[in-house]
């Protein structure tokens, strides 16, 4: 078993919320229960789901995002304070093979971004207290607000300068990383949901219609992410999950990695990547030839967009194919994404979810002799 993350069998992090937890959060919003009661229900649900992850054989455990409606919205809502974040109709959307679409809202900020106290650090501390496995926490990419809404979403009331916005965002991450580390976080995932999408012509066209030069924007995005990555404490392992969107089985971009390989793999100062390779939309494994020799890749070969269980022989063959470009010692395996990026994001049952996680563990043991 690797001493430090990522592990041979790993996971992205979000898990299906149980129905009673969703109901409890709705009661809390309607002020039918107090926060203390909601927290107790969350605590119990997290204990249960952590035990299931342990029994599946995973070395890294997540709280499943059970305390969060959306890791993106909850993170930035805490950073801008009460009334500082609102949602409006955006110009991006999720889509599927049938041509159906789900609109994606843009998040508009009305107050400057500022770290005033732990955002997810307390969540991590509880997770660490209930398991001997490595607790894993996920934070959104620092560029996501701009990607979703462009400058219009940021320069209305809170800012007159994007430079100041980026500076404030980086400082928020610097402070939160320190708080997470103090709470016991040694394994952090930054969910990068923007850069790879520039490989999709429709996405690039949308960005250009906003008035942005997408090439210059990508340069800025990489600089901001690198500034955030460099803020991680020395004892914290930080990886990047590269995501094309995942909502109720829908996706946002149809793009392989080759188009953005230089920015994603070479310029981005990440030590390892969770890469989606569960469908033809992700492009060929051959893109791994662009990965520098000092980086590790977690192959997202098991899909969270369908309940159908993958063929173990197919998974082993795909890992072998990937090893033609990256040494087996620098490869791991995982689902391609989380199972529930927000509360309503599900296309399978909890039993089907854990069958997939057990498949990841079993496959890793067959290939590497460890998980």
Image (cartoon, rainbow, N blue to C red):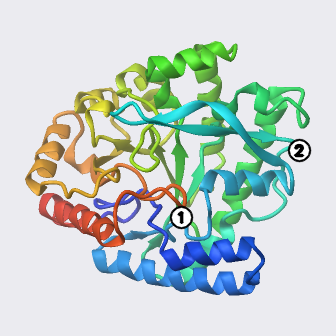
First-in-chain label (1 vs 2): 2
106 with respect to 365 (left or right): right
Count of number-bearing discs:
2
Foreground label between 1 and 2: 2
Which class describes the residues within 10 Å of circle 1: few (<14), some (14-19), or many (20+)?
Answer: many
Q: Position of residue 46 (x, y in %)?
A: 51, 79
Q: Residue at x 75, y 73 (%)?
A: 30
Query: Residue 138's image quarter?
Result: bottom right
* CA distance for labels 1 and 2: 31 Å
* Residue at image mark 2: 111
Q: Could one spot residue 132 in this view of the protein?
A: no
Q: Residue at x 33, y 26 (%)?
A: 290
Q: Residue at x 60, y 36 (%)?
A: 226
For the residue pair 160 and 250, the one nearer the viewer reads as: 250
Tag of residue 81: none
Q: Could one spot residue 89 in this view of the protein?
A: yes
In the rendered image, the vertical position of residue 339 relative to residue 58, given as above or below: above
Mark 2: secondary structure: loop
Query: Residue 151's image quarter?
Result: top right
363 with respect to 246 (left or right): left
55 with respect to 231 (left or right): left
Q: Position of residue 1 (x, y in %)?
A: 28, 67
- Quadrant where the image shows the C terminus: bottom left
């Amino acid at each position: 078993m690797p001493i430090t993350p990522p592990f041979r069998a790993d996971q992205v992090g979000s898990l299906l919320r149980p129905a009673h937890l969703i109901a409890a959060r709705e009661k809390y919003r309607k002020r039918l229960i107090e926060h203390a009661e909601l927290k107790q229900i969350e605590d119990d649900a997290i204990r249960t789901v952590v035990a299931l992850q342990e029994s599946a054989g995973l070395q890294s455990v997540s709280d499943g995002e059970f305390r969060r409606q959306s890791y993106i919205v909850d993170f930035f809502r805490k950073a801008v304070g009460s009334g500082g974040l609102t949602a409006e109709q955006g110009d991006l959307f999720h889509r599927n093979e049938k041509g159906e679409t789900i609109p994606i809202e843009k998040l508009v900020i009305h107050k400057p971004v500022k770290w005033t106290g732990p955002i997810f650090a307390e969540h991590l501390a509880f997770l660490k207290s209930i398991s001997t496995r490595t607790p894993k926490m996920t934070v959104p990419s620092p560029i996501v607000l701009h990607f979703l809404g462009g400058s219009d979403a940021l320069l209305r009331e809170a800012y007159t300068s994007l430079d100041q916005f980026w500076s404030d965002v980086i400082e928020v991450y610097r402070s939160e990383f320190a708080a997470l580390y103090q709470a016991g976080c040694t394994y952090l995932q930054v969910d990068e949901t923007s850069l790879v999408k520039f490989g999709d012509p429709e996405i690039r066209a949308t960005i250009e219609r906003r008035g942005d030069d997408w090439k210059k924007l990508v340069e800025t995005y990489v600089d901001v992410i690198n500034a955030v990555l460099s803020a991680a404490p020395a004892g914290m392992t930080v990886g990047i999950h590269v995501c094309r969107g995942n909502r109720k089985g829908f996706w946002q971009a149809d793009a392989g990695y080759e188009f953005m390989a230089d920015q994603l793999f070479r310029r981005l100062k990440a030590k390892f990547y969770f890469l989606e390779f569960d469908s033809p939309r992700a492009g060929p494994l051959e893109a791994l030839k662009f990965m520098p020799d000092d980086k590790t890749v977690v192959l997202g070969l098991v899909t969270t967009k369908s309940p159908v269980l993958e063929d173990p022989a197919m998974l082993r063959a795909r890992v072998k194919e990937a090893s033609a470009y990256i040494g087996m010692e620098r490869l791991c395996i995982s689902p391609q994404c989380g199972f529930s990026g927000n509360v309503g994001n599900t296309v399978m049952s909890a039993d089907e979810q854990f069958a997939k996680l057990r498949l990841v563990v079993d496959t890793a043991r067959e290939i590497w002799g460890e998980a």
